[in-house]
Every structure is written in structure tokens, then in C-alpha cells.
Image (tube, grey):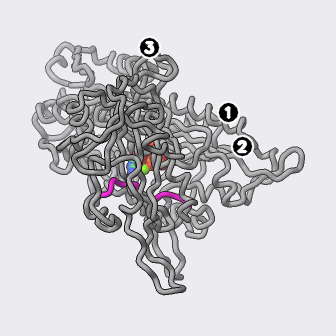
Amino acid sequence: MRLSQMLFVTLREDPAEAEIPSHKLLLRAGYIRRIAGGVYAYLPLMWRVLQKVSQIVREEMNAAGAQECLLPQLQPAELWRESGRWDTYTKAEGIMFSLVDRQQREMGLGPTHEEVITTIARDMIRSYRQLPLNLYQIQTKFRDEIRPRFGLMRGREFIMKDAYSFDADEAGLKRQYDKMHTAYCNILKRCGLAFRAVDADSGAIGGSGSQEFMVLAEAGEDEVLYTEDGKYSANVEKAVSLPPDVEASPFTAYKKVDTPGTETIAKIAQLLKCSPTAIVKNVLYQAVFDSGRIALVLVSIRGDQDVNEVKLQNELTKLADQYGGKTLLSLTVPDAAAQEKWAAKPLPLGYIAPNLEDSYIKPPKPMPAGAIAVNPVAPKFLRLADKTAVDLKHFVTGSNEAGYHVVGANWGKEFELPKLVVDVRKAIAGDRALHDSTQTLKTARGIEIGHIFQLGTKYSQALGATYTNEQGEEKPLVMGCYGVGVSRLAQAAVEQSYDKDGIVWTAAIAPYQAIVVIPDIAKAEQVEAAEKLYAELNAAGIETLLDDRNERAGVKFKDAELIGIPYRVVTGRSLQQGKVEVVKRATKESQDVPLQDVVPTLTQWLSAAVNA
Ligand code: ATP
Ligand code: MG
């Protein structure tokens, strides 16, 4: 392609709309253009990158025995009602764009395709002989993200590869899952990216396991905890570890003490000269279920520890049926405005004890006989204890009175241990690992580009997708699902590889592998040599750009660096010796190569780079 004929517009300045380097660079280098919040046009250079990534994904999926298909983006509401996800996806989480067609039928734009694929399986899979099966597609997904940001990283319209496997049993699912794991590692290696596969939160769906694939980069939205022996890595949302050892409480007798101005653990520990590990901290949350009911949740946890809200959400989701619902819609720390709605009197914030009386919650308004109570707030606190709080002896905790704590308290004596003991503790860097306590957890930031998930029978049961086994029994299909964010991966590649001058693509996914630059188009010999090389390189299968614009050489070199093409060939001064200058983008190393050696040299470099 000739730059003179391309839609080629680069910007010298960083666009104000972008925060992270990859987003700035993709905008500046003319790869993408914002059309609306989280909605981008993929310009010709970007589209080539996306096609390269897609092709690598496709080849690895095919090699793993999956089959490509293309499913509809417009999906009928009934399917989502069958799985029970219509209301959560369109109303509660509101992630699904929905519409009403001219015949008043409700439809959604696919954020994911479990419902569609499971209906197909229900209709078409009858027998164990048709199993195993793995179907995938590469397609635009729609999600009305609350906070679309960072360009293609979190878009509202983005490209995903999604695959769904169907098996007769858990063992079959495990085999497909392992194949997908291998395929994902291959995809990332071929793209030339540094990554880590980590244990991931499977939400309330449960399932036997899930892993995320993280491209390592500072701007990543996710935190990964790992050990250096390579045996453990997990998303912080899911991570487990050994908490630090407890330091014995200095208090042996129970008493209430005057502790003014000690709303935080640090302050109370300092005042009482005790370790935060001798304190029970009581954290208040407000949980809203899909039934509309609200639970006020009081979590007792060891003072030096924090609550992992993802783990807490999972525990609360398990309790949804007690609140007449199926799932949890939101979990928040109630602010003053929220407290005002349900608190009967001001809460002793910073001094809450595990036994905060239920009378802090307003009773429901008295209703005329026969009317349904309108107060959605459950009248009692839902009390949970984190495992770290359970074994504490003679601990310090709040007194339910501002300015006072109690010391020397014990479960089973002054306080009743909550019946629900859970693990909702947040693992952090520096904690000792569970598998080997000599290993400590290290932290890294990552961009989640893929997620593999053992779904089990959640969707097949909900939609009645069954098969007949060898014994003639009807069984639900055992499913897995596997996603790769193709457009997010392409941007993550930039986030991992750029310098002050621009993008540094790896050879495997660069839009073009080489760019031939004519420093001065007024010089016939420069043009002639460049045209010849351009034709030869393309003929040799090296995708090559020709910068034949009427621009200064400096502008051309800057642009070539900005767009990140791996090899730049310059038909400049060294032509007099029958040579051209070849510059490697990543290292800026430059060497003069005889004209006739350019094609073989680049062919060799590229094959080494792609197979590295
Ligand atoms: P996230 O936690 O980042 O929102 P997710 O758990 O919702 O991701 P999945 O539903 O598992 O993601 O989707 C599979 C893959 O699609 C993700 O691993 C990610 O790479 C990509 N993806 C998800 N949401 C977006 C988005 N809004 N923009 C771009 N890519 C996305
Ligand atoms: Mg998401």
C-alpha cells in the first residue's frame, strides 16, 4: 500500500480524550477513531492488526478441534428469560442493549452467546455420539459498560472470540478446558506477548474452575498475585493466602475503655498499644437482591485484614433465596444518604461491635390489615464472620458507642460468634502462600484478554439441553465457555510494547511488516529503487508500505516510528554504494544492506521474529 493513497492522518499531540499510552498512540497513529463513548471505528491499519490477531486465534482454535460458526447478534428476549438472565442483563446490571421491534417483540444485542448456543445444542444434539463438540465465533459484542474507557480496552462494542464446548461429563469438559488452556497460551505466545494464566473468580455460577489470561502491563485494570516458584497465580479477586500470624492481645480482662477519636484501626491500635491482629473490625455493607429486598450486612474480620468484596458478593449470592431472590444486584458501603433511609438512629460509625442491635434498623411502617409491607429492608442484620476473626481471644472491638471500645472480649462470652463463618478476606502482596509458606505473594498488573470457564450444567439445565447417554438415560450437556477479547488483546499488545516515539508492534500482528521510505520524492533514483524494493518485498510475501508522500524525510521517519512497523527501509544516501538503510523499529539498530539482499534479509529476520 502506498501512503500517498491511504487515509493516513497522524497527530503530533496527545489527544485529550486518552489516558493510557496505548489509547493515545492508537489515536495519534491513526489506527482508531472515537465515534461515541466506547464506540470506535477501526481504521485500515487497525483492521489489519485485528485480522491478524483473529487469524492466530482461528488457527489455534481450529488446531484444538473447535469449529467456527457465526451466531446472530440480535437475540430474542425469550431465550434470555429461559436462562433467567433477561432482567439482570437489561435492568439490574443493564449491560445488554435491548430494543423493541416493530411487532413489539423485545430483543437484545448479544453481550455473550450462552443462550443462543445452548438453544442450538438443545435442538441439534441428541446423543452422546455427537459429543464432544466445541463451537466458536469471532464477532462484535455489545455491552453497555458503566464506564467505557481506555479505548478498545473497555468498549461498548468490541470484538470477541467466544467458544462453547459440550460434553457428556465433567471429565470430558476438563479435557476441552485443558485444550483451550493450551490454545490460549499458544495464541499469546504467537502474538509475542508476556502473559500469565491466573485463577479467576467464577462468580456465583460456581463451576469447577476458571482462569483468566492476563497480558502483563502497568496500565492493567487487574491485579495479579503470584509466587516466584511459578506454582501459584490468581486474580486478587480470587486469591487466597495465609494471613500474618496473630500477635497476642495484651488484654486479659474484659472492660470498656474510653478511646476518643479512634475511628480507624490504626488509631485504636496506636492508642491501646496493641497489634491490629488483636482487633475485630466490623464492616457494614448494604446488599440489594433482585427481589428488591435489601440486607444490611455486618462482617466481622480481623483488624489488619480487609474484605474482598468479590468474595463477599459470592457469599451473599448464595443467600439470595433467603431474601426471596436469585441473585445479588449490588453491594455497597452505605453512605450517609443510604443510612438515612433505613437507620432508626445514627450509627456508631468507627465503633461498631459485632452485636450492633437490630433496633438500628427502622421497623417497617405499620400497614393496614391485608396490605403488603412496603419496607424492603430486612429487619435484622445479616452477620458474617471472616475466618480470621474466629480464633481471636481477648480481642479489642467496638462498643456500639462513639468514643469507646471494649478490650479483652471473647466469642461465646461477651459476643456471640456469627453462625456464618466465611472466607471473605483479601489476600495481598507479602502474604505467605498456601501451597508453601516460605513463598510470599508478589503483585503484578495485568490486562485480562481471555477467560476460560467450566460452566457445568447451568445453562443446559435452564434451557433443557440434554443428550442421551450410552445407557439410554437423558442427561444435561456439560458446558464450558471460552472468551478472547480480540480488540482488547490488540490494544494490550501496544500497552506492552511502545516507546517515546510510538508503537512497537511484534512482527506477528503488525499491520505491515516493512515500510519503504523515500526520503525525497524529487530524486528519481530514490523513487526507482524504492518502487523496485516495494514490489519485490510484497511479491516475497512481506506486507510492505511505501511512503511516497511529498513530505520531508523527518516527517516520514517520525510517522514510520509512530505507527510501529517492524522494519524500515530507506532509499537514501547509501544508494550510491548500491545499498539501503534498514532500521529495526524495536531497537532502532540501523545497517546498510545491499539492494539485492533486502528481501532475503527481511525474510530471515521475520521468520526468526515470528517463530521466536
Ligand atoms: P471484564 O472483567 O474486563 O469486564 P468480563 O469478565 O466481562 O471482562 P468476559 O465476559 O469473560 O469478560 O469476556 C471475555 C473477554 O472479552 C474478556 O476476557 C475480555 O478480554 C473481553 N472483554 C470483555 N468486556 C470487554 C469490553 N467491554 N471491551 C473490550 N473487551 C472486552
Ligand atoms: Mg465485564
- What residue is shown with label 2? 167
Q: CA distance from mark 1 to mark 2?
A: 9 Å
Q: Is residue 386 left or right of residue 150?
A: right
Q: Could you tell me how far apart the alpha carbons at marks 1 and 3 are, in whole angstroms? A: 33 Å
Q: Quadrant of the C terminus?
A: top left
Q: Amino acid at mark 3?
A: Thr
Q: As rendered, which of 446 and 116 lies closer to the eye?
A: 446
Q: Amino acid at mark 2?
A: Asp
The residue shown at (26%, 47%) is: 5
Stretch in magenta: 326-334
Secondary structure, mark 2, is strand
- Residue 96 shown left or right of residue 166 in the figure: left
- Say if disc 3 is inside 8 Å of ligand 1: no
Q: Residue at x 42, y 53 (%)?
A: 297
Secondary element at tag 3? loop
N-terminal of the pair, mark 1 or mark 2, is 2
Report the Cα–Cα distance between label 2 and label 3: 40 Å
451, above or below 464, in the image: above
> Does the residue at mark 1 contact the one at mark 2 (Cβ under 8 Å)?
yes
* Image disc number at residue 175: 1
